[in-house]
Image: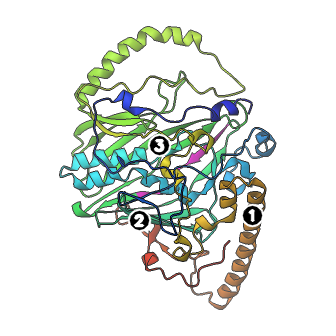
Amino acid sequence: MNNEDEFYDAVTGLDSDESYEGVSEASYKDAVVFDGSSQKNNGSVPQENGIKKHRTSLPAVMFSRNTISVWSILKKCIGLELSKITMPIVFNEPLSFLQRITEYMEHTYLINRACSLSNSIERMQAVAAFAVSAVASQWDRTGKPFNPLLGETYELTREDQGFRLVSEQVSHHPPVSAFHAESLVGDFVFHGSIYPKLKFWGKSVEAEPKGTITLELLKHNEGYTWSNPFCCVHNIILGKLWIEQYGTVEIVNHSTGDKCVLNFKPCGMFGKELHKVEGYIQDKSKKKHCVIYGKWTECMWSVDPQAYEAHKKSERKGDNRKHKNEEQEGAENDDADDMPDVQETVSVVPGSTLLWRIESRPAHSAVMYNFTNFTMSLNELEPGMEAILPHTDCRFRPDIRAMENGNMDEATKEKERLEEKQRAARKERAKDEDEWSTRNSHVNRTDEQSRWFQMGTNPYTNSQGWLYTGGYFNRNYQDLPDIY
């Protein structure tokens, strides 16, 4: 881990304006970024020009991980699922996984754009850009979010972006997080249930995506579904930590038959494919209408398929001239998987249309877990929230709050206390269920009950998943479990 101090001193934002000078984009994200240093205003939420202010930094900088031996913890875990392994809190970031999946909504303006478009191919372009942008916050995020406790919830309403969201930890074994977001003006519904399966493979940790994500554009009577790509964190033991996403993401419009196939490319031997995403949109007759390309860390573009192929052909000619030299220079490193040098920014094909570009992260992001401005605000406990939120909301988790405030000793004690409390509650539930089963052997009963979601059939894929049952925002929070 000797090089980790270099990693956390690295610049984590991209100054996209230099690469795309002259490209304008009217959207919800073009709002002013406010200073979040003052969170109290005589008991009211700070406002500026009628827009609620959100904090743009954390109360304390992150704790150094340099003094912790990762190998001493992980050497017995090769090939095992990490969700079943207790990790020191220093490897966490001060967010619950429920808050982490809320980061899908950072670029909600892309969904709003899709709702406004009359052409189904253009809507698919906006949805595809949203699907890519939803994983962009994972760039350089090497901290592990806290595992949610069974019954834990999280809600977020962002009037400036036009949505509200509720999520709940609906299962403990296996761990499943369900979420439901909806437009404040009735334009869309976005929902899914996620089962993140993590495995340690010696020098890396791989996250396998489990679960289907569904986006419904209500005005157009359309439903889109997809699953996220694989994510891998390299050099867990030695060297500079780095992240890549890879795998095929297939987005289907179940109403029109349109399909978008996106290939998140692995970095390859010489790193030429690092962060690259490439794919196409076709209609139900399998006619390709456009190619989508870019980087999940930077931007996505759309262009005519013929123009793209001509551009790639000219690029391949240049690549062949350099290929032999690269082969001779390449060398293996058994100690660490060196992160390839980040290549030049995306080579834009003439005639391309910009679909999405990432915003620069704040200057202090590197010492605050590489959070974006949106992420900085997720655990903010605004004045008046305590009287409204259910006590199961993860903003009230004492271990996450202590870590956010920089008190690592208290965070560790609270994390251990909550884990022990959860184990005791599970044993009590198992005892009650054994007694219930004895009395009612003819009736099926699920192992774990959820308050706001229930298992059901996805109307588009016919697969089983956790669906929102409604009622959360009625604010009737009686009989919720005491989990903290």
The stretch drawn in magenta includes residue 206: yes
Tag 1 residue: 414
Q: Main secondary structure of the magenta part?
A: strand
Tag 2 residue: 164
Q: How many marks?
A: 3
Instruction: Relative to 116, say whether 25 is above or below.
Output: above
Question: Magenta part of the protein: which range?
Answer: 204-213
Counting other residues with Cα less than 10 Å from the Cα at mark 1, is it few (<14), some (14-19), or many (20 or more)? many
Q: Residue at x 75, y 46 (%)?
A: 77
> Left or right: 212 with respect to 331?
left
> Left or right: 236 with respect to 106?
right
Image-quadrant location for residue 185: bottom left
Instruction: Relative to 347, say whether 5 is above or below.
Output: below
Q: Residue at x 67, y 46 (%)?
A: 62
Asked whether the viewer can see residue 464, the reply is no
Q: Residue farthest to the bottom?
A: 439
Which residue type does callout 1 highlight? Answer: Glu
Residue 113 position in % (x across, y down)? 27, 51
Image-quadrant location for residue 19: top left
> Left or right: 6 with respect to 225?
right
Q: Residue at x 69, y 45 (%)?
A: 79
First in sequence: mark 3 or mark 2? 3
Quadrant of the drawing holding the C terminus: bottom right
First in sequence: mark 1 or mark 2? 2
Which element is circle 1 on?
helix
Tag 3 residue: 136
Counting other residues with Cα less than 10 Å from the Cα at mark 2, is it few (<14), some (14-19), or many (20 or more)? some
Residue 262 position in % (x across, y down)? 38, 40
Say which of marks 3 and 2 sits in front.
2
